[in-house]
Amino acid sequence: MNSLVTGAETGKQPPINEGGLGNEALPEPRSQGAIVLRKFLRHKLAMISVGVLVLIALVALVMPLFWPHSYFDASFPSYEEPSGEFPLGTTQVGKDMVSQILRGTQFSLLIALTVSVVATVLGVVFGALAGYLRGFVDSAISRLTDLFLIVPQVAAAAILVKVFSGSWYVVAIVLAMFAWMPIARITRAEAMSLSQREFVEAARASGAGTGRIVFKHLVPNMVGTITVNATLAVAQAVLAEAALSFIGLGVQTPDTSLGRVIAENYAQMTGRPWLFFGPFVVLVLISLSINFIGDGLRDAFDPRQRKVKA
């Protein structure tokens, strides 16, 4: 009543809230990025996977600085049993297995990240251009995508790696050549849908060129799809590289990888299982962690997902 009297005297109306609450009780609107981040942080399995992956990466990068045995040192006795000095024993050529795993993890993660970045860039560029321009460009890119999809990837990658040597960056580029097609297809579908929206029509009417519309308006609106697929591409690259290295057509010395370490010691799976299961467990943990992170990102970016509240 006093507020009404005061309002009548001053000529101003007091703020009205239908719910009977003050303005300070209303929640502040959150941006889309904040909502996505909040949902992702509440995805328990994804957060555990982030912790595991970060721990593996930190151990692989930092531990070699303090580990007493070098990756290149082959002066130890062959097939030493696990002990305080050699927690996972030594290999046939007298190398410490822990240092082998650390070095292999470094190269496997480096290859996987390189494949993910290159494949994502190629897939997004080709897919966005095909979805927006359509016509001849769409047909040409779609046929190129179909051509790469029907090629036996492992066989073609093995041949190319053998021809151009087995350096880690050669393996990464070859794997990326056969990893961009799924991303391109998904991006093309997204671009075709977004190109019919009002903001694209407005940009086209204002005189914006193809490059500006694609990379300034379409791609930023596909960031959720791009992020999820780039994350999953890392896991696929880890397994693809391990498969090539396991058959001896992947990374070659002096470089190494977890797949190569596993290939060199898989014959000891029954007699000396620590030599095989050490790198194998690390490879599985990396792959599972990245897949679970991808699932968390997919749920966070999906507005229809109600499993994790924003």
Image: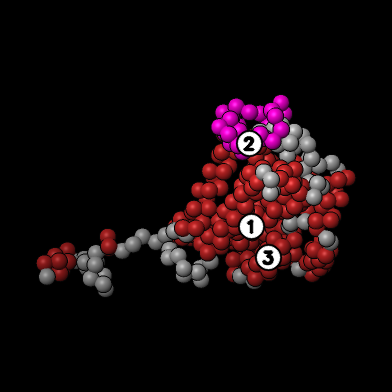
Q: Which residues are magenta?
A: 63-90
Report which residue position mark 1 lands on.
Answer: 232
Tell me the chief SS of the magenta region.
Answer: loop
Report helix, strand or loop for mark 3. helix
Could you tell me the amino acid type at mark 2?
Glu
Left or right placement of residue 202 versus residue 1 in this view: right
Q: Residues within 10 Å of mark 1 (few under 14, many from 20)?
A: some
Q: Nearer the viewer, residue 47 or 279?
A: 279
Q: Quadrant of the N terminus?
A: bottom left
Percent coordinates x, y for residue 80 in the rendering: 66, 34
Percent coordinates x, y for residue 217 in the rendering: 62, 60
Percent coordinates x, y for residue 279 in the rendering: 65, 45
Report which residue position mark 2 lands on.
Answer: 81
Left or right placement of residue 290 versus residue 3 in this view: right
Say if the magenta span includes residue 187.
no
**Of pointers 1 and 2, the one earlier in the residue sequence:** 2
Give the foreground label among 3 and 2: 2
Q: Nearer the viewer, residue 37 or 140?
A: 37
Q: Quadrant of residue 65?
A: top right
Total count of labels: 3
Percent coordinates x, y for residue 232 in the rendering: 63, 57
Give the foreground label among 1 and 2: 2
**Of pointers 3 and 1, the one earlier in the residue sequence:** 3
Could you tell me the amino acid type at mark 1?
Leu
Q: Quadrant of the C terminus?
A: bottom left
Residue furthest to the right:
163
Could you tell me the amino acid type at mark 3?
Ile
